[in-house]
Image (spheres, helix red, strand yellow):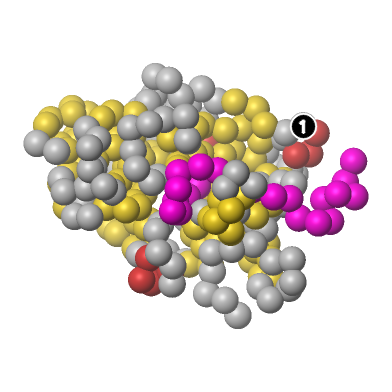
Amino acid sequence: MADLLRRPFGTHGEVHRITPESAGWRYVGFALHRLRAGERVAEATQAREVIVVMVEGRASVRAAGQDWGVLGDRMDVFERTPPHCFYVPNGQDWAAEAVTDCVIAVCSAPGHGGHAARRIGPDGITLTQRGEGSNTRWINNIAMEAEDWCDSLLVTEVFTPAGNWSSYPSHRHDEDDFPRITYLEETYYHRLKPAQGWAVQRVYTDDGSLDEVMAVRDHDVVLVPRGHHPCGAPHGFELYYLNVMAGPRRNWRFVPAPEMEQVG
C-alpha cells in the first residue's frame, strides 16, 4: 500500500511535518501546528517560500523583519469566512505567537527570490461556489495562478457540504506537458464537522498501478503524488480541506479520468 494517508502525530504542538524527502517527491511541503494561547512557532524559510494559513484562532506575527500585528479572526474553520494568511519568501524567517488557541498551517515549495513578504486575505478572498447538485462545494482561493507574487505555491480552501463530492469530476495533474496538463504534487489537509466524522478520498491512476481508497478523519493529510483524487463527504459529515500544490511551473492544468466521459 502506498503511504498516502498521514495521521497527525499528536494533538498539540507540531502535529504534521511533510517534506519533499518524507513524501518521496520534489516540491510540496506541509506542516501543521496546534498551539495554545501564549505558545510560539518560529522558522527560517531557507530555500523555500511559505504561505502560512491561520486555519483557526489568532496569533501575533513577525515575518521578514516586520511586525504584522495580530492575524486571524476565524475561531472555527467551518464558519467559512476568508482566512488570514501571510507569504514569506525564501531566505527569510517568520514567527507566530498564539493569542488564542489556534491551528496554523505552513505550506511550502521552492522559492527563487524577488518577492516581498505580504499579508494575504481576508480582503480579496471571496467564498465562491463550484459545481452543482451533489457536486457543489465552496472555494476560498488563497493563491492560485492569477497571483504573481510567489514562485511555486498554489493554495486554496474547499468546503464540501455533507453528502456531496469534490475534487470531482475526477482529474489528474501528473505530467509536465503544458498547456494540456501540468505536473503538480498536492497535499490535502482534512477537517470534519462533527470532528468525530469521516470522509473518503480515492487516489488512482488510469492503469491501476496506484489505487487507494482512504477513510480520512479530522486533521488527517492525504498525499497526491499522481493520479485522480476525488473526495466524498457522507451524509451528516461536512468536509473542509486545505490544498497545497506545486510543480515545475505555476499553472494548474488537468485532464479528466476516462470514465468521466460517460458522466452527463
Residue 242 in sight from this viewpoint: no
Whether residue 131 is situated above or below residue 109 in the rendered picture = above
If the image is split into quadrants, where does the C terminus sit? top right
Residue 17 belongs to magenta span: no
Give left or right: position of 21 versus 165.
left
Which residue corresponds to the image point at 21% horizontal and 51% vertical from the top-left? Answer: 45
Rendering coords of residue 253 (x, y %): 60, 44
Residue 219 in sight from this viewpoint: yes
- Provide the secondary structure element on which disc 1 rests: loop
Q: Quadrant of residue 29?
A: bottom left
The foreground one among 162 and 209 is 209
Which residue corresponds to the image point at 57% horizontal and 33% vertical from the top-left? Answer: 139
In the image, what residue type sits under mark 1? Glu
Q: Read off the magenta span.
A: 242-264
The foreground one among 182 and 79 is 182
Residue 247 belongs to magenta span: yes
In the displayed orientation, state which residue is furthest to the top: 123
Rendering coords of residue 74 (x, y %): 40, 31
- Can you identify the residue that label 1 sits on? 132
Whether residue 29 is situated above or below residue 126 in the rendered picture = below
Which residue corresponds to the image point at 43% horizontal and 35% vertical from the top-left? Answer: 143
